[in-house]
Image (tube, rainbow, N blue to C red):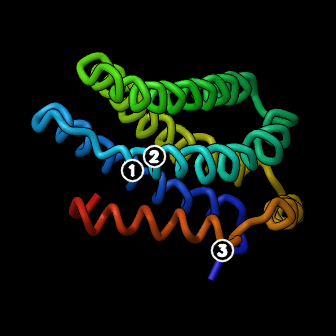
């Protein structure tokens, strides 16, 4: 059952993103230790990061939540939102880099694996801190700033953006599968 509060929904989504990021960290160590690349698995992680993290989760933050927050917030929260938006863009670029590394590894394994490692290190360094800022600072502030009616309207907007559709459930299942494969993430 989906949460009826948009902040709870975003917090829940973060738990899946973190599972994938932590699995990616393990995969990065495996690549370094074993000098092999599981292209299919990395491609699924790229799909997760693009479809679930970016197109679904970040889009709802950027198009729905952030504009409401900055409308009524103190300057330090406006600065935080700007930082978070920059980090979303950095995350997109790191996912592109990961994809380029996979492609490069087909013709030059050494260089490709270096690019993959750089992308993985960037992603695993970025997302835990980013999510912590949203969970611990931005979302509590949003719940204080937004009246109950605004949260209800925001939830309706979230649902209108295709919340809890099959593709998103597929990505959540993938994150849980990674947790089973790599242990508690």
Comparing 155 with 99, the one in front is: 99
Q: Name the residue under label 2.
A: 43
> Which label sits on residue 107?
none
Tell which circle, 1 or 3, labels the residue nearer the N-terminal end. 3
Q: Name the residue under label 1.
A: 40
User: Would residue 102 appear left or right of 91 to someone viewing this image?
Assistant: left
Badges 2 and 1: C-beta atoms under 8 Å apart? yes
Q: Name the residue under label 3.
A: 3
User: What percent of the width, then of the height, locates residue 108?
Assistant: 30, 19
Badges 3 and 2: C-beta atoms under 8 Å apart? no
Q: Quadrant of residue 102?
A: top left
SS assignment at label 1: helix
The residue lying at 87 percent from left, 35 percent from top is: 71
Q: Quadrant of the N terminus?
A: bottom right
User: Would residue 36 appear left or right of 138 to someone viewing this image?
Assistant: left
SS assignment at label 2: helix
Q: Which of marks 3 and 2 is in front?
A: 2
How far apart marks 1 and 3 lie (CA) works out to: 32 Å
Q: Quadrant of residue 163?
A: bottom right
Name the outermost residue toward the front.
107
How far apart marks 2 and 1 lie (CA) works out to: 5 Å
Q: In which quarter of the image is residue 158?
A: bottom right
Q: Is residue 133 above or below residue 176?
A: above
The residue lying at 71 percent from left, 48 percent from top is: 142
């Amino acid at each position: 059952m989906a949460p009826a509060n948009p902040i709870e929904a975003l917090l829940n989504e973060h738990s899946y993103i973190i599972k994938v990021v932590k699995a990616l960290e393990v995969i990065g160590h495996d690549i370094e230790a074993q000098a092999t690349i599981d292209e299919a698995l990395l491609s699924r992680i790229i799909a997760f990061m693009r479809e679930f993290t970016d197109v679904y989760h970040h889009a709802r933050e950027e198009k729905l939540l952030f504009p409401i927050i900055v409308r009524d917030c103190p300057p330090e929260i406006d600065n935080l939102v700007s930082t978070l938006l920059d980090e979303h863009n950095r995350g997109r670029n790191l996912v592109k880099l990961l994809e380029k590394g996979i492609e490069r590894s087909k013709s030059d394994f050494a260089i490709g694996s270096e690019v993959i490692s750089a992308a993985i290190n960037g992603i695993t360094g970025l997302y835990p801190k980013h999510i912590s800022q949203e969970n611990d600072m931005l979302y509590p502030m949003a719940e204080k700033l937004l009246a109950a009616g605004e949260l209800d309207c925001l939830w309706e907007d979230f649902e209108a953006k295709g919340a809890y559709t099959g593709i998103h459930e597929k990505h959540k299942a993938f994150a849980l599968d990674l947790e089973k494969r790599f242990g508690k993430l």
